[in-house]
């Protein structure tokens, strides 16, 4: 399964020059935990998370110590560029979901910007992956049947069952057709594996 099948798109972005408080409102209003940070041309320059923003808002501002004494109590608002993570870990639309999960676990991050060339195509988060896995089996079964019907209308007829995200396709053995059906079933977000159960001619 590819990232493009589970990502959230379009991505909610913030500008690197945005005040921290504005970015906080953006994340909160959109119920997201992180956002790509872009420059004036829309190019990705980093990622900012809830934790980055909270630290930016509540930790002492180091700039206050270098301001003139009369202005030290009123430092200018901190900007996203001062608190963001500059080395953004990214994936592409065609990255396998398992690779995205490995990155999230290994880097201890909750979401990843998804790139299409140099453009931000979306974001994939732990919540997106959880939503995919939470789909009911009956809903997944209907989606698999629809994919087979729409994308392979002249193929063999399969009986489809889904248990805990595993699609079971029952039909007469046909190596080429089974391979196509396997590929189509795996395009359904939430299907984690495909099994073929044979029945007589």
Image (cartoon, rainbow, N blue to C red):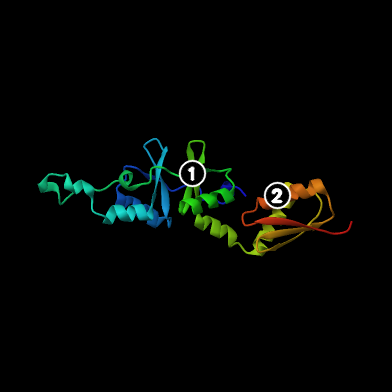
* Farthest-out residue, front: 106
- In this picture, is 31 found above or below 177? below
Element marked by disc 2: helix
Q: Is residue 197 left or right of residue 109?
A: right
Element marked by disc 1: loop
Q: Is residue 189 left or right of residue 183?
A: left
- In this picture, is 42 found above or below 186? above
Q: What residue is at 29 percent from the left and 52 percent from the top? A: 56
Whether residue 7 is visible, yes or no, is: no
Q: Quadrant of residue 44?
A: top left
- Label 2 neighbour load within 10 Å: few <14, some 14-19, many 20+: some
Circle count: 2
Image x and y of residue 93, in percent:
56, 43
Image x and y of residue 127, in percent:
50, 58
* Farthest-out residue, right: 201
Q: What residue is at 39 percent from the left and 56 percent from the top? A: 29
Q: What residue is at 37 percent from the left and 55 percent from the top? A: 50
Of residue 172 and residue 83, the one placed in the foreground of this image is: 83
Q: Is residue 14 left or right of residue 93?
A: left
Which of the image's four quarters has the C terminus? bottom right
On residue 90, which mark appears?
A: 1
Q: Which callout, 1 or 2, points at the residue further toward the start of the chain?
A: 1
Q: What residue is at 39 percent from the left and 35 percent from the top? A: 41
On residue 184, which mark appears?
A: 2
Image x and y of residue 36, in percent:
42, 46
* Farthest-out residue, left: 70
Of residue 13 and residue 183, the one placed in the foreground of this image is: 183
Of residue 18 and residue 163, the one placed in the foreground of this image is: 163
Distance in Å between CA atoms under marks 1 and 2: 26 Å
């Amino acid at each position: 399964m590819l990232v493009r099948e589970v990502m959230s798109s379009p991505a909610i972005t913030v500008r690197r020059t945005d005040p921290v408080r504005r970015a906080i409102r953006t994340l909160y209003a959109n119920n997201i935990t992180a956002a790509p940070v872009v420059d004036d041309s829309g190019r990705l320059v980093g990622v900012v998370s809830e934790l980055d923003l909270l630290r930016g808002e509540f930790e002492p501002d180091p700039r206050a110590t270098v301001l003139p004494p009369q202005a030290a109590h009123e430092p200018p608002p901190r900007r996203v560029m001062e608190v963001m993570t500059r080395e953004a870990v990214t994936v592409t639309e065609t990255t396998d979901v398992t690779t995205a999960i490995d990155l999230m676990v290994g880097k201890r991050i909750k979401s990843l910007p998804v790139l299409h060339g140099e453009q931000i195509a979306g974001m994939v988060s732990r919540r997106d992956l959880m939503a995919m896995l939470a789909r009911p089996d009956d809903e997944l079964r209907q989606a698999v049947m629809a994919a087979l019907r729409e994308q392979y209308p002249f193929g063999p007829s399969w009986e489809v069952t889904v248990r805990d995200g595993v699609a079971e396709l029952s039909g007469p053995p046909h190596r080429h057709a089974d391979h196509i059906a396997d590929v189509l079933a795996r395009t359904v977000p939430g299907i984690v594996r495909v099994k073929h159960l044979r029945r007589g001619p």
